[in-house]
């Protein structure tokens, strides 16, 4: 479908309390309920290039779940604005901004990072000790840089907002440095 014949990472569909879990966790299957929150995270390959896309959906009328879903793209766009206006920003600096934006919106952040490099498939595998490939604490190189092959680095920004007390979260991700249309 859409020219996708393979994925570069596992396909994720999570609901309810499983939406609190970060990417590396593998919770068991769960049946969705009438009043649930669901997120999808897919990593398709288009013409040899990795993509990464995540969205959240709400079943039912719970206003807090709807607010969470609606806050995800707002926090993403605010993170993107920070990236756009800070040309020398490091992954660590952008992560700190995402954490601030998350707290300002009244949520907790649900993962150890807020994104990662993406590129031509197969790109170099990101090992846990290669922190510079993530938007997280300790990633101190400027994000706008060339990779080892001399190509411009492209980044995925991930927003994982959670409400631990109520037992749900939401997820939103897409390419950070895509040109966006004028408003």
Image (cartoon, grey):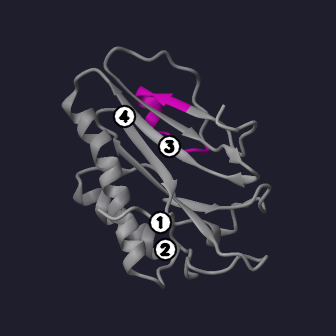
Q: CB of mark 1 within 8 Å of CB of mark 3?
A: no
Disc 2 designates what residue?
A: 92
Residue at far left of view:
63
Q: Residues within 10 Å of mark 1 (few under 14, many from 20)?
A: few
Label 4, label 3: how far apart the Cα atoms are? 16 Å
Disc 3 packing (10 Å; few <14; some 14–19; many ≥20): some
Tally of marks: 4
Q: Read off the magenta span.
A: 13-24
User: Looking at the picture, how far across and down is residue 7, in whole percent?
Assistant: 71, 41
| Position of residue 133 in the picture relative to residue 48 (left or right) | left
Q: Mark 2 vs mark 4: which is more N-terminal?
A: 2
Sequence-wise first label, 3 or 2: 3
Circle 2: is it few (<14), some (14-19), or many (20+) Cα within 10 Å?
Answer: many
Look at the image and tell me in which quarter the C terminus lies.
bottom left
The residue that label 3 is drawn on is 54
Q: In the rendered image, which residue does mark 4 sit on?
A: 168
Q: Is residue 75 placed above or below 132 in the rendered structure?
A: above
Q: Secondary structure at mark 1?
A: loop
Relative horizontal placement of residue 39, taking residue 140 as reference (left or right): left
Residue 34 is situated, as x and y percent measured from the top left of the image, at 34, 14
Q: Nearer the viewer, mark 4 or mark 3?
A: 3
Nearest to N terminus: mark 1 or mark 2: 2
Q: Residue at x 70, y 38 (%)?
A: 4
Q: CA distance from mark 2 to mark 4?
A: 26 Å
Quarter of the view holding residue 66: top left
Query: Which quadrant of the figure has residue 84?
Result: bottom left
Question: What is the CA distance from the residue labelled 1 to the residue labelled 3?
Answer: 18 Å
Query: Does the residue at mark 2 contact the one at mark 4 (Cβ under 8 Å)?
Result: no
| Residue under numbered circle 1 | 179
Name the residue nearer the viewer: 120 or 162.
Answer: 120
Q: CA distance from mark 4 to mark 1?
A: 32 Å
């Amino acid at each position: 479908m859409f020219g996708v014949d393979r994925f570069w990472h596992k396909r994720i569909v999570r609901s309810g309390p499983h939406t609190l879990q970060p990417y590396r966790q593998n919770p068991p299957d769960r049946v969705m309920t009438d009043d649930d929150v669901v997120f999808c995270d897919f990593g398709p390959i288009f013409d040899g290039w990795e993509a990464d896309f995540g969205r959240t959906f709400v079943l039912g009328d719970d206003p807090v779940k709807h607010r969470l879903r609606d806050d995800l793209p707002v926090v993403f766009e605010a993170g993107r604005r920070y990236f756009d206006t800070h040309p020398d920003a490091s992954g660590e600096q952008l992560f700190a901004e995402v954490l601030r934006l998350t707290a300002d919106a009244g949520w907790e952040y649900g993962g150890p990072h807020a994104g990662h490099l993406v590129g031509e498939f197969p790109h170099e595998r990101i090992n846990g000790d290669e922190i510079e490939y993530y938007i997280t604490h300790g990633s101190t190189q400027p994000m706008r840089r060339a990779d080892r092959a001399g190509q411009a680095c492209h980044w995925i920004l991930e927003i994982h907002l959670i409400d631990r007390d109520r037992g749900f979260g939401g997820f939103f991700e897409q390419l950070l440095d895509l040109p966006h249309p004028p408003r």
